[in-house]
Structures are given as C-alpha cells and as structure tokens.
Image: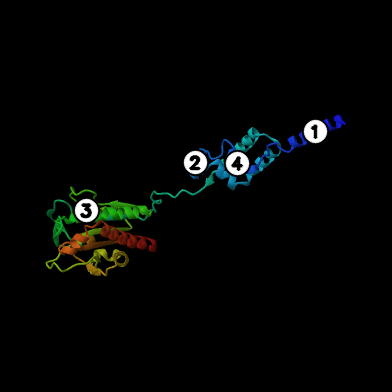
Amino acid sequence: MAFMIVAIWIVCVLVAAGCTPQVLDRQAILQESPIVNKETPAVTSSATMQPVAGSSVADTLQKSAAGTEPIAKAAAGAGTETIAKATSEAAIKSIAKPRTESVASKTAATPQKGKLVMLDPGHQRYGNNAPESVGPDSRETKPKVSSGTVGVRTKKPEYVLNLEVSLLIKDELVRRGIEVAMTRESHDVDISNKQRADMANEAGAALAVRIHADGDSSPKTKGFSVLYPSTSTAAVKPIAAESHQAAGLILEHLKAATDTAGRGLSARSDLSGFNWSKVPVVLVELGFMTNPEEDELMSEAEYQKKLAQGIADGIEHFLKSR
C-alpha cells in the first residue's frame, strides 16, 4: 500500500513537471531575439539600384513571409539560440534583395545634331564707331557696334542685361538638348554686327537669335517685341520666311510666359545683323530701359527667367517644325 502511495506521488510529480516547460511562443521570440530591432546596413549596388535604406530585421520579419517561415520551423523543436540564428538568416535573405529604381538624370539631354542655335547678346562694353556696310547690296554704312542704352532707374548698361538673359536662354536650351553657341560671353570684346552674322553663318546655325533691350524718347513706352528681316531686302529673301516664322513663335511664347501682350512683330531692313545673315535670324527686344518700371522689371531674377523661358519655348517650337 505504501509502495502504491509512493508510486502515485511520483507519477503526480512527473505529470506536474511535464505541464510546466517553457513554451516557445512565436511573438515572444520576435521580441526577445537578440537581432530584432537592429538596423541592418543598406545593401550597396550599381548606380541604377537603390538600397532599401532604413530597413531593420524586425521590419522585414513583419512584412515578409520568407522571414517568418523558418522561425515557425525552429520553434517546433529548437532552443532560443537556434531560433535566433534562423531569424537572422531569414531576415538577411529577405533584405539582400535591393529594389531596382530608375535614377532620373539631372544632366542635359543629348544634343540634337543639326539644330545649333547661335545666341547673340547685343552690344559690348566699348562701342566701335568705324563704318560698316549695312548689307551686301547696300551702300549705306553704320557704326560697327555700339555699347547700347542704359537703364533709366537701374543704371545698368544694356550690354550687361543682354548677356544676363542670353545666358539664361542658353541654360534652358542646353537642358532641352539643343546645341548652343554664343557670339560673346564677356563684355570686353570687339565684334561688329556683320561679324556676329558671319559667326552664325559659318556655324551653320539653324537659327540666330539676337538679344537686345530698347530705348525711346518717351518714358511711357514699354513692352517686348520681336524683329525679323524684311523681304524688301534682296539679300535676305532666302531666309525671310523662316525668320518670320521663328519671330512669330517666339512672340507667342513670350506672351504666354510673361502674361503680357508685348508690342508685336516688326520687319526691319536697316539692321546689319539681319542683312548679312544667311541663316534664319530674329532680334528680341526685351523691353524698354527708358521706362522706369520696365527697366527695374527686366533686372528682376524671376522676370528674367520668364523671358528666357518664353524665348527658349519659341526656339524649341521652331526647331521642331523644321
């Protein structure tokens, strides 16, 4: 009898002991694993690959089935150390798959061959009053080049304003993949109007764009305008139609960019830079430096950007139509 009591007591002890082992709870494992909540170094790759930055093993385990499967298997019959190892391997396998993302290029587009634009920032620091023929079929002469007008309020020389805006136009065109050459990028040059036309001719430019600002005896006169060669000049007849087209496109885009009407188009027969040109050519008058308000406006960075945008839009439209 005593033996049976002892035996029953031993069985009870064994049963009680069998009911209290530590149960491997899956959520507890995720919380207690020594590598959970540790940042995993980003996976580096080529320029066209982006690493999964800021990911942790815990994030991966929660989002990836591949990370939870090995843990469930480990929980079935392994200790904490084995489970931690399975957790680590699963997480690393999941993380070591970088996302492929296209990297946007911030560089200029590939230049469009045969679409060169010659920008001519009008005037220069010192004028050259030596006479120059207005055109190949004219006996009339004009000074080779002047220094231009001066802002009535800003006191800025026209040659400075012309170059400022021309450089912005250049940046806009290059960004769009349009090849650009410039007659000058410095104020200290001596280039006549005929020579500027010759530079565009020799480069085989698709379009020459001359950038100027205007002046008038009345301080009330204002507004941009676009000039083009007159068909009354025999030498420019081969380029007259395309020049007129380019002028119209630039004017329309200037209107849109600045939200103003401007002064319109004007055909000219008295400009050396037109009459010596063998490629389509236009001249943009940005506005009147003799108008106090417009003088200041043309020196404002935001307005200069609008002018450059409108002119570049018109040029691009013209080139696409050829």
Alpha-carbon neighbours of circle 2 within 10 Å: few (<14), some, or many (≥20)? few
Left or right: where 173 falls relative to 221: right
Label 3: state its secondary structure: helix
Tell me, for residue 46, which label it has, or none: 2
Q: Position of residue 58 (x, y in %)?
A: 56, 42
- Earlier sequence position, callout 4 versus callout 1: 1
The residue that disc 3 covers is 195
Alpha-carbon neighbours of circle 4 within 10 Å: few (<14), some, or many (≥20)? many
Q: Position of residue 83 (x, y in %)?
A: 64, 36
Residue farthest top in this picture: 3
Q: Is residue 278 above or below residue 31?
A: below
Amino acid type assigned to the residue bearing label 1 in the image: Trp
Q: Position of residue 202 (x, y in %)?
A: 29, 52
Amino acid type assigned to the residue bearing label 3 in the image: Gln
Q: Are marks 2 and 1 in contact (CB under 8 Å)?
A: no
Left or right: where 77 falls relative to 158: right
- Earlier sequence position, callout 3 versus callout 1: 1
Structural distance between the alpha carbons of marks 4 and 2: 33 Å
Q: Is residue 126 above or below residue 84?
A: below
Q: Are marks 3 and 4 in contact (CB under 8 Å)?
A: no
Label 4: state its secondary structure: helix
Q: Is residue 220 visible?
A: yes
User: Can you tell which of label 4 and label 1 is closer to the viewer?
Assistant: 1
**Residue 208: quadrant of the picture:** bottom left
User: Can you tell which of label 3 and label 4 is closer to the viewer?
Assistant: 4
The residue that disc 1 covers is 9
Structural distance between the alpha carbons of marks 2 and 1: 70 Å
Label 1: state its secondary structure: helix
The residue that disc 4 covers is 30
